[in-house]
Image (cartoon, rainbow, N blue to C red):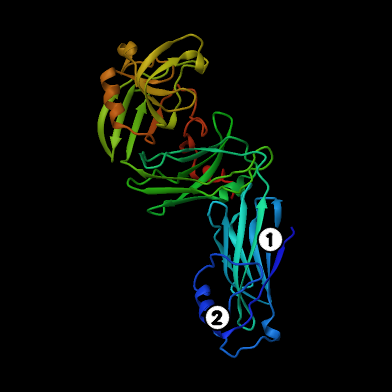
Amino acid sequence: MPSTRVLAHARVRATVVAAATAALLAPLAACSSSGSSGAAGTGADAKPGADDRPVTVTVTPEGERVPAGGPVRVTAAGGRLTSVTVTDAEGHKLAGKAAADGRSWVSDRKAAPGARYTVTTATRTEGGTAGSAEAAFTTAPADKVNKVDWRPGAASTVGVAQPISLVFDNPVKNKAEVEKQLRVTTSNRTEGSWGWLTDWSGRDRVDWRPKEYWKPGTKVTLNAELNGTDSGAAGGWFVRDYTTAFTIGARQIAKVDLDRHRLTLVRDGRTVRRIPVSGGTPGGDKRSWRGTAVLMAKEGTINMNSETVGLGDAYDKMVEHSMRLTWSGMYAHAAPWNARYFGNSNQSSGCIGMSDANAAWFYGQVRPGDPFEITGKDTKGVVAPGNGFGAWNLSWSEWQRKSALR
């Protein structure tokens, strides 16, 4: 890749020693490509010599509309870098690290597409003369942009089974490069791992789940530093970062025994209430899922139409206190039309139904992220990882193998 070379050199004058010293104590606000500051610590009678030749500063990349997605590199020949500032047109800075000898500097972040960067450097010659230089380059705009939908939302309080979940608009071929930019910070060093899935929508998705259920009270932050990352073929570029922070609430588990037709809400190890329910009708497509499902959302009053879940014209009705458990359409909700079956028979179209009173109470107790641990002999299988938040149905080792970095 081509690079920009500029000379940073300052002539020594006793009258500018103090000004040069001040310039080195803070990043320069503006400077020219030729350099013009004085020499700090050289003395009033210092004279230019063989070891005081101009510093050659090289910036990579250089030019207009250069490819994005790489770090910014700055090198110095004939001296060392004392300060490097890389700023885009909006004033955002790319942080970076200098080599121990001061001869080079590399940005931590990649250059984003469609941006203009100004690189300002302060230098010191081998003889001690301070100088400055400035260079600029632009990156080519993205021909395609990838966007992210993420859960949970910022400032929310969620249940102990809630994963961090990112769903991408376009395919992600460079999964390892994307995963490297995703940083999860917890208040108690919770162990967890990313895993790549195919979402129920067919899109690429990556979830982060702990090894075990979260500890109540844990503070969690996600920093997805994706700006400047290439998704790969057909995926496009990420042109922004994403962040969310949330808190883990009480340890609440809804234990659903389809054989006994009973839901038990357990909070912090103590049974709060047992509720008679009716699950999916045995022997066909109306059976319920088993395994661990996670409460995705409390949707309230919604229209449920059997045609949307492949069950023909079996039903089309407004349903109260609806709590979504899977993308495929399994809910817990009020089902007064099935009142005679609560506690003694499974006769629903796959959902977990209960009385109006019990559904209203239960709806007020639970929150998104609470696990539903569902057992029963006659079910249609275990909730898949991409069907809602079904990652808990994989062992820890199975889940870790879904990371692109393992």
Give me the residue at 32% from left, 41% from top.
Answer: 249
Drawn side of residue 325 relative to residue 367, left or right: right
Residue at (50% x, 13% y) in the render: 307
In this view, the residue in front, 70 or 191, is 70
- Per the rendering, the mark at residue 17 is none
Q: Secondary structure at mark 1?
A: strand
Residue 281: x %, y % from top left: 43, 15
Toward the right, the furthest residue is: 2
Residue of label 1 = 60
The amino acid type, in three-letter code, at marker 1 is Thr
In the picture shown, does residue 325 fall above or below 52? above
Residue 379 in the image: x percent, y percent? 46, 23
Few, some or many residues within 10 Å of mark 1 (<14, 14–19, 20+): many
Q: Position of residue 66 (x, y in %)?
A: 70, 52
Neighbour tally class for label 2: few under 14, some 14-19, many 20 plus, Cα within 10 Å: some
Q: Residue at image x 37%, y 42%?
A: 155
Badge nearest the viewer, 2 or 1: 2
**Residue 316 seen from this side:** yes
Which is more N-terminal, label 1 or label 2? 2
Q: Is residue 281 visible?
A: no
Kindly indicate the quadrant of the structure image that contains residue 303: top left
The residue to which callout 2 is attached is 16
Front-most of residues 247 and 403: 247
Residue 298 in the image: state x and y as whole percent.
37, 28
Nearest the eye: 267 or 378: 267
Number of numbered discs visible in the structure rendering: 2
Residue type pointed to by label 2: Val
Viewer-proximal residue among 95 and 375: 95
